Amino acid sequence: MDLIGRRYDTGELIRLEVAGDKVHTVTPITVDSGHPNDHPWIAPALCDLQVNGYGGQEFSSPTLTPEAVQRITRQMDTFGVARSCPTVTTNSPEVMLHAVRTIAAACEASPAVAYRLPGIHVEGPFISPIDGPRGAHPLAYVRPPDWDEFQRLQEAAGGRIRILTLSPEYDGAAAFIRRVADTGVIVSIGHTAATPEQVRAAADAGATMSTHLGNGAHALIPRHRSYLWAQLADDRLTAGLIVDGHHLPPDVVKTFLRAKTPARCVLVSDVSGLAGLAPGRHHSEMCELEILPGGKLVVAGQSEVLAGASAPLGTCVANVLRFGEVSLAEAIAMATTRPARLLGIEAGGLNPGDPADLVLFDLIRSDGEQPPRFEVRGVLIHGEPCGVR
Ligand SMILES: [Zn+2]
């Protein structure tokens, strides 16, 4: 199979030949007719470390089935996302065990699903109980770190948990983090009210990420002694950023990117299970939510209180170009090779021998009213063309 597109990193027009699940040859070409810009961009397919569900189904749900896991995963294909981490958020021990067990069952039933889901992200329940940092996680199920519970989850997941988001504000958190990190699981700081000292102690103990930095935080923070500065200043922590246009204002995105540098940032969608539903009011297990016409997901009747994200990862790529003043090559790296490297997997690429996980897309500039768009024209995952709407 041959693909023609403009390289995301150099802008050069290429013909890329795929053989099996690998890139075979890559040849620069010139076009006889039309303009090179008529061709789509070509880049590695995306890798999203935080997907909570889609189309009315949360992963963290007592009703999750392997079929629903497969459905959500195939939906990600259409967004150009080849690999993603199904994210199981704070809930009762029974529901969290059910969720990870069901995701594992879906992976065992289908090699295609297993390829697309290289690891589960467990976000909570060992997070801050405090309003603001806790975000939309239900207080009733927030609890301090518990090694035995984590072990039970990992066992139910068949060892597939790859990221654990927690708050280091609890006594004994550092020892717990060291123990988890020693098993090869990425420990990510998030939904936290920790002191700067506790953030540093967490990184000393092996934490290597910050989960959606700047969200799941107090509305007001002390200007100097803050978990935000402590995480921004610590080069051992790679920051996950939700750049959907709603979760972080442009100034914050630009400042975070300058502090951490694009090399220490990854883009995440954090899409909610309600993403993909029509605008209007929807009932979730937690509360009444509303999807506004632009796709913003809020608590019903409160247009400024975010209740989750609804934009796929490509939207974050399009936004970060504008907000962060980064190149397309850097924006794509933050959504492909960098998150893949954290997971210890190989992203697609544009060199012979690279995995044929590729996306062809157009970037539609913002017209002032509409945000910029990442429009998927074609997707190849594991060498196979996948459905695009
Ligand atoms: Zn979160």
Image: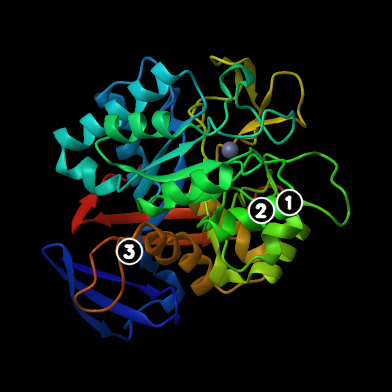
- How far is disc 1 from disc 2 in space, using C-alphas? 7 Å
User: What's under tag 2, amino acid-wise?
Assistant: Val
Residue 227, label in figure: 1
Query: Does 196 sit above or below residue 62?
Result: below
**Residue 356 picture location, percent across and down:** 23, 64
Residue pictured at 72% horizontal, 64% vertical: 254
Residue pictured at 66% horizontal, 33% vertical: 128
Pick the residue in front: 88 or 66: 88
Pick the residue in front: 351 or 141: 141
**Residue 250 visible here:** no
Residue 161, label in figure: none
| Label 2: which secondary element | helix
| Label 1: which secondary element | helix
Residue pictured at 39% horizontal, 17% vertical: 94
Q: Is residue 318 left or right of residue 259?
A: left
Q: Is residue 242 left or right of residue 197?
A: left
- Label located before the other in sequence (1 or 2): 2
For mark 2, what is the residue?
A: 199
Quadrant of the image for the C terminus? top left
**Residue 45 picture location, percent across and down:** 35, 59
For mark 3, what is the residue?
A: 347
Q: Is residue 39 left or right of residue 278?
A: left
User: What's under tag 1, amino acid-wise?
Assistant: Tyr
Q: Nearer the viewer, mark 2 or mark 3?
A: 2
User: What's under tag 3, amino acid-wise?
Assistant: Ala
Q: Residues within 10 Å of mark 3 (few under 14, many from 20)?
A: many
Quadrant of the image for the N terminus? bottom left
Dividing the image into four quarters, tell me where ligand 1 lies: top right
